[in-house]
Amino acid sequence: MERADVISLLGRLKQAYPQAYAKMARAEAEEMVSLWSDMLDGEDPAAAKDAVDALIAEDTRGFPPKVGQVLAKIRGTVSPHVSVAWMKPYIERIAEQEAFMPSVSRYAREHELTWEAAAAEMGGGRMERVVSFVVDGRPVPKGRPRVTRHGTYTPKSTQIFESAVRAAWLECGERPFEDGEALEVMVNAYFPIPSGTPKRKRGGLDLSPYLKRGDIDNIIKAVLDALNGYAYKDDSAVFSVCGRKFYTDGEPLTVVTISSVEVEHLSTADPVCRRRGIPAAIANARTIRRTSTAIT
């Protein structure tokens, strides 16, 4: 497919899903055209058009199809799953340090259990679907909107990072999460070790906490905002987030993991609170309140 064919194809999607593309900046649109051109290189334009038309006709969720879905439709296969085997050292280190998702991790620490045992004992937090993908490049916190006499705009660095997050999601070829699913999101940001650091110190810094500028909450916000209309309809579906910053001796990157959780199995309570029907958050708040009263 030529670039002009891709632009025509995306124009067709824009007509079918005007809301999904309404706020897309020009730079972001250019990146999307480039990504689709690379992914659809060598495919027949007529077959791609037929695939897009079929996906639009089959859609019941209101999300535009991703390039991976289009490729799968053209080739008559299920949507491809991108291997993340090269991420294994990072994911294994994360699992060793604090397990995989925050609600189960906290319970595991509090009760001195393995992550698997904690998940089983909680009787919930069971993941229906887990998607991990990697955003190449230095993590960028969400910048405050800039106000000028010409209007309000998002800082360029934020726009570029959010475009990279969207491109990484599109590249993994996963379908969006359903509206109404409860989602947990983990964001692990990896920053480069300063170039002037002596070799004897670099090994000790690799995968150690990064405590410099770049607030983790703003990095998480940039990721969540970027995925609106792509990974999910709206980030209000995210009920739990966890973010961490590390040094890396390799290339800077951001690893994003999104998990849908079975709502009926959600539990943040310890066994005693569960038996009494008291959510842990309320129980903890009561304990803190009583302790504060006693101190005063």
Image (spheres, helix red, strand yellow):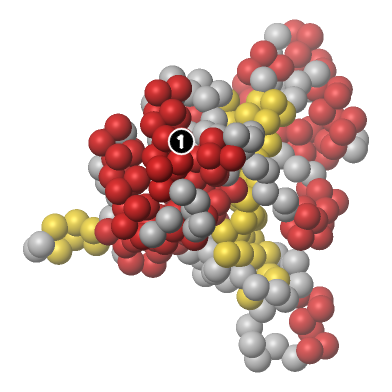
Viewer can see residue 240: no
Q: Who is closer to the viewer here, 209 or 220?
A: 220
**Amino acid type, callout 1:** Ala
Q: Residue at x 28, y 45 (%)?
A: 11
Q: Residue at x 45, y 41 (%)?
A: 47
- Packing grade of label 1 (10 A; few <14, some 14-19, many >=20) is many
Left or right for 157, reference 86: left
Left or right for 147, reference 30: left
Quadrant of the rendering where the C terminus is positioned? top right
Residue 23: image x %, image y %?
Answer: 27, 46
Viewer can see residue 5: yes
Q: Is residue 37 above or below residue 290?
A: below
Quadrant of the rendering where the N terminus is positioned? bottom left
Disc 1, SS: helix
Q: Residue furthest top?
A: 276
What residue would you read off at disc 1?
51
Q: Who is closer to the viewer here, 257 or 167?
A: 167
Displayed quadrant of residue 71: top right
Residue 65: image x %, image y %?
Answer: 45, 36
Residue 94: image x %, image y %?
Answer: 77, 53
Picture mark count = 1
